[in-house]
Amino acid sequence: MGVRRGSAAMNMGQAMLLAGDIGGTKTDLAMYTPQDGPRVPHARAEFRSARYPNLEAMVREYLGRVKLPVDRACFAVAGPVIAGQAKVTNLLWVIDAATLAQDLQLTAVYLLNDLEAIAGAVPLLEPSELHVLNAGAPAHGGTIAVIAPGTGLGEAFLTWDGTRYRAYASEGGHADFAPTNPLQAGLLRSLWDQYDHVSFETVCSGLGIPHIYTYLRNQGAAPESPDVTAQLATAADPTPVIVEGALHPTTPCPLCVATLDTFASILGAEAGNLALKVLATGGVYLAGGLPMRMIPLLDAGGFVRAFRRKGRFADLLARVPIHALIGRAALIGAAGYGLDLMFSENGGGHRGQRTHDTGQVSGDHGPR
């Protein structure tokens, strides 16, 4: 584990907030102070989640290395959070906020869904942390949708209450996969032989990319690179091999390219579905590790075409701004949520938040 310390001076006697982005593949941890806010992490570190039996073991190792005073913690979790408990999707961890606070001797531990954290971070992001896929024409105060293909597929949204945006989690990624062309219909039929329920996450995530690849290979849809074949034979996780094969700067694998083109089309269709369901006139934001790596393929146009292909509502969706997040949004959101609670519990009211379209300060983010 490498620890990266923030450049700002820290008051070593001041209790800090530990914030974390807990994912099925990796976990980011960092320390924050109320003075520096959620955009200035101190002692940030990245862990491979599966190497630890539980979150407590990871946090103990981290705190033992950074040796900074911590009072509270806030964790964004890749899974539903109910009554202070969360089971991390795609990882055999169960997190209980009260138990974790007691075991780590913290005043409080806050849990929120990782997509809720990402959504809450959207109004705090700078233009340099966003990549424009469709400029659109955002409606002031319009609902914002967030969709994040990573290890799984997360979805969330924000609504404007007249003074600030409030973030809400969902489990929309587990809704039934709906194919939009004959190729995708064949993919669905092939997966029905393996699964009782085929969700969008089954095909539109890090877990889903190998399903698309295998189906296209079996259909002879495109040639498979010998180098990719050799790498897949020994790879513990085939998804990075397929993504790197598609994005190779000189000799991309045709089958890998076809896989990610299909993936982008499915992602675009589901992002459009989400935009219609919440009427996301404020914009759609793509988060997660996959979009950050796939910017060139997303720019190629297949994603946006699939997003807009909604019959009579194509013109409406053409006006919806679409951005890909290229920063650590979940960690920012978890830090902002935790600092807001620390601030309000200490009698400070609400911390300021930058809105996504005007830059004005307008209260805090996230549900209470």
Image (cartoon, helix red, strand yellow):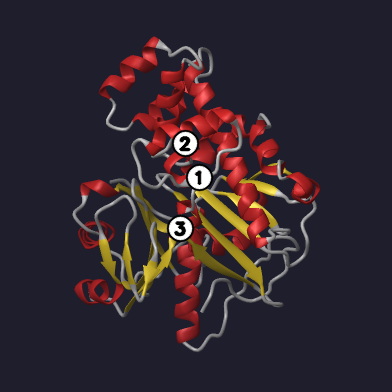
Residue 302 placed where, x, y %? 65, 32
Name the residue nearer the viewer: 201 or 248: 201
Visible residue check, residue 135: no
Residue 41 placed where, x, y %? 45, 59
Q: Amino acid at mark 2?
A: Leu
Circle 3: is it few (<14), some (14-19), or many (20+) Cα within 10 Å?
A: many
Residue under the image location 44 percent in, 72 percent down: 338
Residue under the image location 45 percent in, 41 percent down: 205
Q: Of the two numbered discs 1 and 2 on the same chain, state the one appearing first in sequence.
A: 1
Q: Amino acid at mark 3?
A: Leu
In the rendered image, the vertical position of residue 350 relative to residue 52, given as above or below: below
Label 2, on which residue?
Answer: 188
Label 3, on which residue?
Answer: 331
In the rendered image, the vertical position of residue 260 relative to residue 166, given as above or below: above
Name the residue nearer the viewer: 29 or 109: 109
Label 1, on which residue?
Answer: 177
In the rendered image, the vertical position of residue 33 relative to residue 195, given as above or below: below
Q: Of the two numbered discs 3 and 1 on the same chain, state the one appearing first in sequence.
A: 1
Residue under the image location 31 percent in, 80 percent down: 107
Residue 73 placed where, x, y %? 35, 70
Contact flag, marks 1 and 2 (Cβ < 8 Å): yes
